[in-house]
């Protein structure tokens, strides 16, 4: 499951259930915590040419466009891109979509974009080192990169949540952090009545992300681990556990000299 074709085929099979979950507003934590934090981190986007890499059915691209960016979304899955096109047809002209692997962006010339973003996609993408090389190639000098992923130190192949005797979540276990072999997870959005996803995870380490950016020439500008505030936890009570115990996300930004 480490090649472009197999990852794309997997997400083709996931496309219908994933898109319906997004449309029904079931991805609550990403929508109301992850994406707002990501957009705040990016700052003003008016008129900026953005490549949204691993855009899926276009949810992240739509948020970027709503913030003023001129967005091109790419994804390896034809079915996901078809879903993105269908949604774009409801309000045409704002976002361009292309089917492409993040590890092969040959459909774009060098130094094409002001900013490359990837929201919650790279942990599901093979060969992060090659991906960073392509991100660097298509970024303009002085342009930026921003990626958000599941936090690799906590979402490991041996991740589990344990509960206290009263049934409340009270902590988590992580193990096999240095396991490099891809593994599969089966899950669905909370409240989704039908349709589970099978997702191949690529268990990159913290240093895999950082070093691959540095090796290809990016300068690291910031590294953050967004933590829910008390106000956010009041609105999303499920985040209280994460506020107390571990980071959901890793957010890294850099610049091309």
Image (spheres, rainbow, N blue to C red):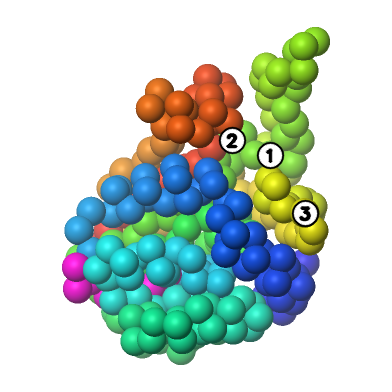
**Image height check: is 203 above or below 121?**
above
Q: Quadrant of the N terminus?
A: bottom right
**x and y percent of residue 222 in the render?**
31, 43
Graded by Cα atoms within 10 Å as few (under 14), some (14 to 19) or many (20 or more), the crowding at tag 2 reads: many
Report the residue marked by disc 1: 156
Cβ–Cβ below 8 Å for labels 3 and 2?
no
Q: Position of residue 27 (x, y in %)?
A: 58, 51
Q: Are marks 1 and 3 in contact (CB under 8 Å)?
A: no
Question: Which stretch is magenta?
Answer: 46-52
Residue 51 is one of the magenta-drawn residues: yes
**Circle nearer the viewer, 1 or 3:** 3
Q: Element at badge 2?
A: loop
Mark 1 Cα within 10 Å, few/some/many (few <14, many 20+)? many
Q: Which residue is mark 2?
A: 153
- Left or right side of 143 for 224: right
Q: Is residue 252 magenta?
A: no
Location of residue 225 by image quarter: top left
Q: Residues within 10 Å of mark 3 (few under 14, many from 20)?
A: few
Under tag 1, what secondary structure?
A: loop
Say which residue label 3 marks.
Answer: 193
Counting residues from the start of the chain, the first of labels 1 and 3 encountered is 1
Q: Position of residue 52 (x, y in %)?
A: 42, 69
């Amino acid at each position: 499951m480490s090649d472009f074709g197999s990852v794309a085929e997997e997400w083709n099979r996931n496309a219908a259930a994933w898109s319906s979950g997004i449309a029904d507003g079931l991805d609550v934590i990403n929508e109301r915590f992850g994406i707002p934090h990501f957009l705040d981190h990016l700052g003003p986007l008016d008129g900026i040419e953005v490549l949204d890499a691993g855009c899926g059915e276009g949810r992240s691209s739509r948020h970027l466009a709503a913030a003023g960016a001129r967005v091109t979304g790419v994804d390896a899955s034809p079915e996901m891109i078809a879903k993105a096109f269908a949604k774009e047809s409801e309000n045409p002209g704002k976002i361009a979509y292309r089917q492409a692997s993040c590890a092969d962006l040959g459909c774009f010339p060098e130094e094409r974009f002001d900013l490359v973003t990837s929201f919650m996609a790279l942990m599901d993408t093979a060969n992060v080192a090659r991906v960073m090389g392509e991100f660097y190639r298509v970024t303009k000098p002085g342009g930026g990169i921003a990626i958000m992923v599941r936090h690799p130190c906590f979402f490991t192949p041996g991740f589990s949540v344990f509960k206290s005797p009263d049934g409340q979540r009270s902590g988590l276990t992580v193990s096999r952090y240095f396991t490099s072999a891809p593994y599969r997870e089966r899950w669905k959005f909370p409240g989704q009545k039908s349709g589970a996803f099978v997702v191949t995870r690529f268990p990159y380490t913290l240093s895999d992300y950082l070093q691959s950016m540095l090796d290809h020439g990016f300068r690291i500008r910031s590294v953050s681990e967004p933590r829910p505030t008390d106000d956010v936890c009041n609105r999303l009570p499920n985040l209280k556990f994460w506020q107390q115990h571990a980071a959901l996300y890793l957010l890294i930004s850099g610049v091309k000299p």
